[in-house]
């Protein structure tokens, strides 16, 4: 294993642990708003897919980018749908 791969795996593992610790401390009443906002922010994934599409040269690369674009778009759309549904609860009924 190269030192660069070891450093990447260390950062990935630490980010998993920190993310789990932060999310586990969120009260249940705030979990849905937090997750809907986080899903909406995942539009950054779509920007990354577009940037990586410039470098793809093989069918496998295009396939992976297509899968990433699909899941990123689904995550963004789901985040906006949940956020809209939550905000509808606070609108007046008149």
Image (spheres, rainbow, N blue to C red):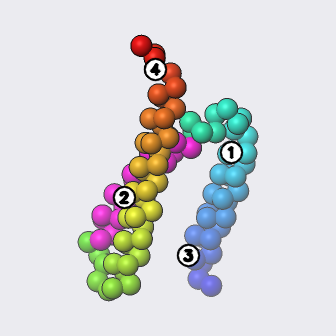
Residue in front for this viewpoint, 94 or 89: 94
Q: Is residue 51 magenta?
A: yes
Place of residue 40 in the rendered image (x, y in percent of width and height, measured from the top left): 44, 45
Q: Is mark 4 on a helix, strand or loop?
A: loop
Residue of label 1: 22
> Label 2 to label 4, Cα distance in Å?
31 Å
- Judging by the rendered image, the residue that carries numbered circle 2 is 46
Mark 1–mark 3 CB contact (< 8 Å): no
Q: What element carries label 1?
A: helix
Disc 1 packing (10 Å; few <14; some 14–19; many ≥20): few
| 3D distance between C-alphas at marks 1 and 3 | 27 Å
Q: Where 41 sits versus 61, above or below?
A: above
Alpha-carbon span between mark 1 and mark 2: 25 Å
Where, by quadrant of the figure, is residue 16 drawn? bottom right
Q: Give, as a single range, the part of the protein colored magenta.
A: 35-53
Q: Which of 78 and 49 is in front in this view?
A: 78
């Amino acid at each position: 294993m190269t030192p660069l791969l070891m450093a990447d795996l260390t950062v990935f593992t630490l980010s998993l642990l920190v993310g789990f610790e932060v999310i586990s401390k969120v009260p249940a009443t705030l979990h849905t708003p937090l997750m809907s906002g986080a899903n909406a922010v995942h539009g950054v994934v779509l920007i990354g897919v577009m940037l990586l599409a410039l470098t793809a040269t093989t069918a496998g690369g295009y396939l992976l980018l297509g899968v990433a674009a699909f899941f990123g778009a689904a995550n963004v759309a789901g985040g906006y749908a949940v956020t809209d549904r939550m905000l509808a609860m606070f609108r007046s009924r008149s």
